[in-house]
Image (cartoon, helix red, strand yellow):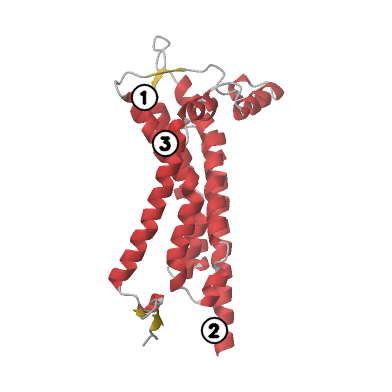
Amino acid sequence: MGILAVKGGKVKKPVKSNEEMSFLEHLEELRWHLVRISAAVVISAIVIFVNVKFIMDQILFAPKYPSFITNRVFAWIALKFNSPDMAINTKPFSIINYDMAGQFSTNINIAMIGGIIISIPYIFWEFWQFIKPALYEKERKHATGAVFYSTMLFLLGVLFGYYIIVPLSTHFFGSYRVSEEVVNQINLNSYISSVTTIILGSGVVFELPIVIYFLAKVGLVSSGFLIKYRKHAYIVLLLLAAIITPPDVFSMLMVSGPLIVLYELGVVLAKRIEKNRTDKELLEA
């Protein structure tokens, strides 16, 4: 039984530990974490909404222009190896809007997705604050830096999607023609949806080592399992790369490479967890 604190003639109830909290109290605690996360996303979204012109012109539309850094690198490679087909986005396509509220709804979508991306460090931190009290002291020490590494992997995925997948996708779909009679004039909502989906999806996919880490931590997967089904996992990753990239072998291999590296990093993390678990069992024996 907790000790009651008396202050100013009033009896203060003790703060309950994580073990003493009921299911409904856990839900209430989670609700407040979600409220703070929502507030952070909304504030970030408002900032983006106000500055949408800069974000559209300098960030989201940039990958379709020849001056974009990735396009310039491919142009240099094409010139170096005398292979004009290697150059991408040499002819920017037009973007049009034919919906009455199309530009406004696009502004809102960009603001919300951008708000999530900007708030990711805080979102991870809030979820960590919710999970941390349920961990033992040693588990907390092993999980030190979880927020940092999760954030870094997500941002790395966002950058990879923006600088690699988006330019390749815009080049393929922007230049693809079933007939020379048909001119590509891409709808604004279609373009923005594709770009933001790729960027956000890449950030999520790059969390693969973190997912494997926690699955191994709770015993749902092992390094042996991951190694045994490595070939199957590679096929799944290749299929995933084929889905989020233009349908050509070069783009698929360029994207699948980092995904395979992330999978192997997950295998290393699983082995480390198993080693720590074995060491702990030997010490307790």
What is the spatial separation of the Cα atoms under label 1 and label 3, in whole angstroms?
12 Å
Q: Position of residue 55 (x, y in %)?
A: 50, 30
**Which residue type does callout 2 highlight?**
Glu
Q: Which mark is residue 46?
A: none
Query: Residue 268: horizontal and vertical position, in percent?
Result: 58, 63
In this rendering, the answer to whether 236 lies above or below 7 is: above
Is disc 3 surrounded by few (<14), some (14 to 19) or many (20+) residues within 10 Å?
many
Q: Position of residue 196 (x, y in %)?
A: 44, 36
- Decide: few, some or many residues near mark 2? Use Cα within 10 Å; few <14, some 14-19, many ≥20: few
Tell me if mark 1 has few (under 14), some (14-19) or many (20+) residues whose alpha carbon lies within 10 angstroms of its own: some
x and y, in percent, of residue 255 in the image: 54, 41
Helix, strand or loop under label 3: helix
Image position of 276 (left or right of 34):
right
Image point (48%, 20%), residue name: 175
Label 1 vs 3, first from the N-terminus: 1
The residue pinned by badge 1 equals: 103
Specify the amino acid type for callout 3: Ala
Q: Earlier in the sequence, mark 2 or mark 3?
A: 3
Marks 2 & 3, CB-CB < 8 Å contact: no
Instruction: Report the front residue among 24 and 259.
Output: 24
Q: Nearer the viewer, residue 10 or 260?
A: 10
Q: Residue at x 68, y 24 (%)?
A: 76
Q: How many marks?
A: 3
Q: Secondary structure at mark 2?
A: helix
- Kindly identify which numbered label has been placed on residue 111: 3
Task: Please name which of the two marks, 2 or 3, marks the residue nearer to the observer.
Answer: 3
- In the image, 206 versus 3, the foreground residue is 3
Image point (52%, 73%), residue name:
139
Which residue matches tag 2? 281
| Mark 2 → mark 1, Cα distance in angstroms | 60 Å
